[in-house]
Image (cartoon, helix red, strand yellow):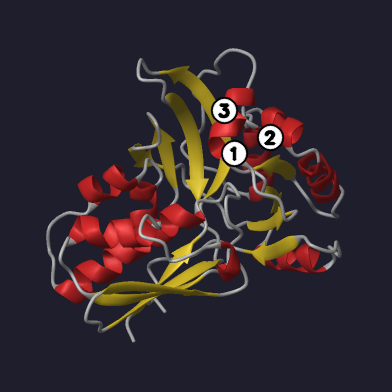
Amino acid sequence: MPRRFAPAKVNLFLHVTGRRGDGYHLLDSLAVFPAVGDVVSVVPGEALTLSITGRFGGVLRAEPDNLLLRAARALRPEGHAGLLLEKNLPVASGIGGGSADAAAALRLLACYWGIETPLEGVALELGADVPVCLDSKPARMGGIGEILSPAPQLPRFGMVLVNPGVAVPTPAVFRARQGGFTPPAALPAGWVDAAGMAADLARCTNDLQAAAIGIQPVIGQVLEVLAGLPGALLARMSGSGATCLAIFATPEAATAAAAAINQPGWWCWGGGLYDPALADI
């Protein structure tokens, strides 16, 4: 059964740099992809269908406007296939799960249907976060998220992700955001270690964090727990929330730190970055 891993997308910082005339906000962010995510599979079918399983599968329904089905129809309107989604990531959680699933579906179905045309244009039509998820590689995001440039050279580091079991709709967070705009971050060409990277990222912000905490105060509790973990170099919310992250010196340290978190109803994960250069699952 052909299948593709859809890793989470984590924003190590997120600056709101302006606003377009059509109301879309302009952003500056550094996105990375940890080795945790959903799995999209395809089987032969006489129609285009979607089945959903996994820990968070019950939250979603295989409705006609599901992003995976929209991705499939955008790629080939009359295409037939049975899509299977193993939903391991929290829904509406600020780590790009839906966008990652759509990107994985595009890659998977393009191969399954023998389509060789570039996917970037189709990806952007589905959402501003979908293009960066196509390759699942660290990238600097600009514009509304669709302008991609190489990320600084990243050191080996670990990350803990925690979601407290609440959903935070992105539009509501942007509406609640107060204050002006933040200039794009000045980042070096790379970092030699996690401590140096965390120190530079600490001078950046997530401009949506305060608004998200106002909507779901438990996000503030998550950040306190993460900041208090031994070895945590930086704690911050990802995207529009409610998932938060902490950076550690190594993936092993992050795995151990995540195992020490024991909060009922919280989703926790610790480890390193996904390596798309390795064979896909």
Q: Assess whether mark 2 and mark 1 are in contact (beta carbons under 8 angstroms).
A: yes
Looking at the rendered structure, the secondary structure element under dot 3 is helix
Looking at the rendered structure, the secondary structure element under dot 1 is loop
The disc label shown at residue 240, or none: 1
Cα gap from disc 1 to disc 3, whole angstroms: 8 Å
Residue 111 x/y as whole percent = 21, 72
Residue 249 x/y as whole percent = 70, 55
Badge 1: residue crowd in 10 Å (few <14, some 14–19, many ≥20): many
Kindly identify the amino acid type of the residue bearing the numbered disc 2: Ala
Residue 168 x/y as whole percent = 64, 43
Residue at label 3?
174
Question: Which residue is at the far bottom?
Answer: 1
Residue at label 2?
212
**Residue 263 visible from this viewpoint:** yes
Pick the front one: 120 or 228: 120
Cα gap from disc 2 to disc 3, whole angstroms: 9 Å
At horizontal 13% and vertical 66% (from top left) the residue drawn is: 115
Q: Assess whether mark 3 and mark 1 are in contact (beta carbons under 8 angstroms).
A: yes
Q: In which quarter of the image is residue 46?
A: bottom left
Looking at the rendered structure, the secondary structure element under dot 2 is helix
Kindly identify the amino acid type of the residue bearing the numbered disc 1: Ser
Cα gap from disc 1 to disc 2, whole angstroms: 7 Å
Which of disc 3 and disc 2 is earlier in sequence? 3
Pick the front one: 140 or 114: 114
Question: Which residue is at the far front?
Answer: 63
At horizontal 77% and vertical 64% (from top left) the residue drawn is: 258
The quarter of the image holding the N terminus is bottom left
The quarter of the image holding the C terminus is bottom left
Q: Quadrant of residue 157?
A: bottom right
Residue 161 x/y as whole percent = 68, 56
Query: Is residue 108 shown left or right of residue 165?
Result: left
Q: Quadrant of residue 276?
A: bottom left
